[in-house]
Amino acid sequence: MLRAVRHWWWLHLPASASPQVGLGCGCVRGRQSGSRGTSSYPSLFGGAVPGVLNVFDRVLKRKQKNWAAQQPEPLKYDYLKEEVGGRVADRVYDIARDFPLALDVGCGRGYIAHHLNKEVVGKFFQADIAENALKNALETEIPTVSVLADEEFLPFKENTFDLVVSSLSLHWVNDLPRAFKQIHHVLKPDGVFIGAMFGGDTLFELRCSLQLAELEREGGFSPHISPFTAVSDLGHLLGRAGFNTLTVDTDEIQVNFPGMFEVMEDLQGMGESNCSWNRKPLLHRETMLAAAAIYQEMYGNEDGSVPATFQIYYMIGWKYHDSQARPAERGSATVSFGDLAKINNLMSHGKK
């Protein structure tokens, strides 16, 4: 397992005591103006699929992301998504080919396209549920089309894109298997999907501190950190969706903050507040202060700051094509692994 812990700067921000801490787990008609266009489709934002466990309030998540995108200083909270978007872009550069048409699912303000160039990607479709994020997208040299669309209901035809990417968005999807199948559906044969999403150890310091404080002050606790997908499940879900030649790896990014309230303020500024249906509507003041004290006591650094850990899962999957390398048929081998020991003996005799 790749484990890269990166320490970021200590952010001096005013305290905020918001209780909604968070983090979980057809043809498009549009008009292009210059290099950036805007398209939309009649989507069921927040709509539920029959038979699927409805964990997240997608309507609330859209409001949270829209609110975050229209803040006076959105760049103040973009540091994590910028970093992960850059790491996803690095994986695109690792593939020795160009992609005439690409799609970013849950693009936010365009954190992946910002790190790519037009020599690698010819044209970028950026899809997100938050119109304010699309309007305030970061500049890129790649011609882009912004599409107001839900990650759970992609409005594109089969075999459309050479590349699909996604960064820190799919952890809010109610039906992840369906989302993977839709991504596979819109990819061309031999197309590739490269994604990143938060892992299960994300914000474990905040989760433990809140739970201990609630147990002490209120005699029980409620979930304040949304559920995440386990890394062991990702490969299985991608395989079920039809992807092959899978790669899944994980790393960690650690950010230092002055205190727990600054952690919560940044989550809100990122649009990553909790939107689970079973979230607790509020936390008492005494419980919040106790959680901050526990956070500092259990995880505090020597300089007085506190760390917040973000675990990131990276995944790569390919859509099948006849030109791709395939494993040999079972039983077609002509040499046994048991014969490898004989090679060493033959080499030793040859030296003599």
Image (cartoon, helix red, strand yellow):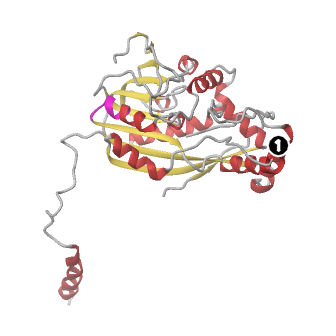
Closer to us: 160 or 155:
155
Q: Is 304 rendered above or below residue 122? A: below
Instruction: Please state the horizontal and vertical placement of residue 39, each as a whole percent of the image.
Output: 44, 13
Q: Residue furthest front?
A: 51
Instruction: Please state the horizontal and vertical placement of residue 210, each as a whole percent of the image.
Output: 74, 46
In this orientation, does residue 49 appear?
Answer: yes
Left or right: 234, with 281 as reference point: left
Q: Inspect the image, locate mark 1, and give the three-letter code of the amino acid beneath it.
A: Thr
Closer to us: 227 or 99:
227
In the image, residue 188 lies in the stretch drawn in magenta: yes
Check disc 1: other Cα within 10 Å, few if <14, some if 14-19, many if 20+. some
Looking at the rendering, the stretch of residues picked out in magenta corresponds to 183-189
Q: Residue at x 34, y 38 (%)?
A: 192
Q: Is 342 rendered above or below residue 128? A: below
Q: Does dot 1 land on a helix, a strand or a loop? A: helix
Left or right: 212, with 247 as reference point: right
In the image, residue 345 lies in the stretch drawn in magenta: no
